[in-house]
Amino acid sequence: MPHPVPPQVVPRPATWQPGEDAPWAGLAPAARTGISLDRVLAAFAAHGQRGQVPDSVAISDELGPAVVLDESPAPGVGAVNAAVLAVLFEEAGEVRLILTRRASSLRSHAGQVSFPGGRLDPGEDAPTAALREAYEEIALDPAHVRVEGWIHPVFTLVSASLIMPLVASVPGRPHVVASPAEVERVFDVPLRDLADPEIFHEERWSFPGRVIPGRPDSSFPVWFFEVEGELIWGATARMIHELLRVVLLPAG
């Protein structure tokens, strides 16, 4: 059954320029396929991103303003206030990643592809919030979910959210049902497809008055993945970009 994709508003500046190839573009196809859950978890362990999120984790230098659209945290956003789940499961020897398309009626990020998750309620930590929101959005049973590791937090200016992405696994294809008020589509994609250099592209954006340290042209990268008839960009693309770097490229 087809899933019509609503047009997305991508605020691309007139000054944008093509960027670089994916960091994993030079890998042989065999290195980008046959990705098992064990391989993913071993890679996160090698990068020091397996297990509980360290208290010291914040936006790293590598994942700082240039990568997050120069969206330095706004005043009053001094700590993680949202969390999402990058849920993985293995099928036919390939790890698959669960994604959602947000409802077009939502106030922010309408129609965009995202991971299940949302804002922390008072007193919640990131794993509790991510599991609760995933249950509310796609009926993902938290009893079947194991939090395995983490990706560096990402800030989004539109919703003033400092998002903690958590990597999780489920033992097999889960039963999920989209909540129509929040989600228009739930789908899953094998990491091998996301790792295909042909579905990725990078653009360099710049805006008047926005200075990016270390870049003479004050440009920053914006990443896009086109897969399953969907355009993935913004915060979710930044998270997937790091996920793939961790899995496909050596630590250090």
Image (cartoon, rainbow, N blue to C red):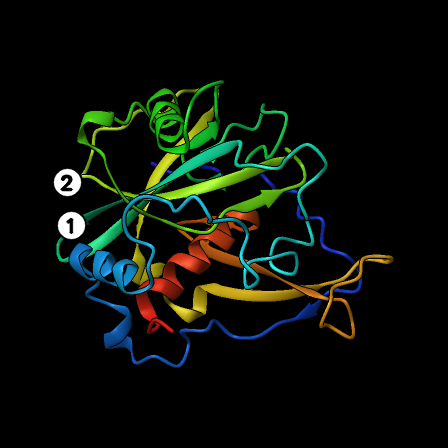
Residue at (14, 40) in percent of width and height: 171
Residue that mark 1 sits on: 91
Q: Residue furthest front?
A: 56
For mark 2, give the secondary structure.
Answer: loop
Whether residue 140 is situated above or below residue 199 in the rendered picture: above
Residue 125 image position (x, y, % from top left) = 41, 29
* Helix, strand or loop for disc 1: strand
Q: Residue 90 vs residue 191: left or right? A: left
Q: Residues within 10 Å of mark 2 (few under 14, many from 20)?
A: few
Q: Are marks 2 and 1 in contact (CB under 8 Å)?
A: yes
Residue at 57% from the left image edge and 62% from the top image edge? 61
**Amino acid of disc 2:** Gly
Dot 1 amino acid type: Glu
Q: Judge from the rendering whether residue 146 lies leftward or rightward of residue 232; answer left or right.
A: left
Mark 2, residue position: 172
Circle nearer the N terminus (2, 1) = 1
- Tell me the quadrant of the picture where the N terminus can be found: top left
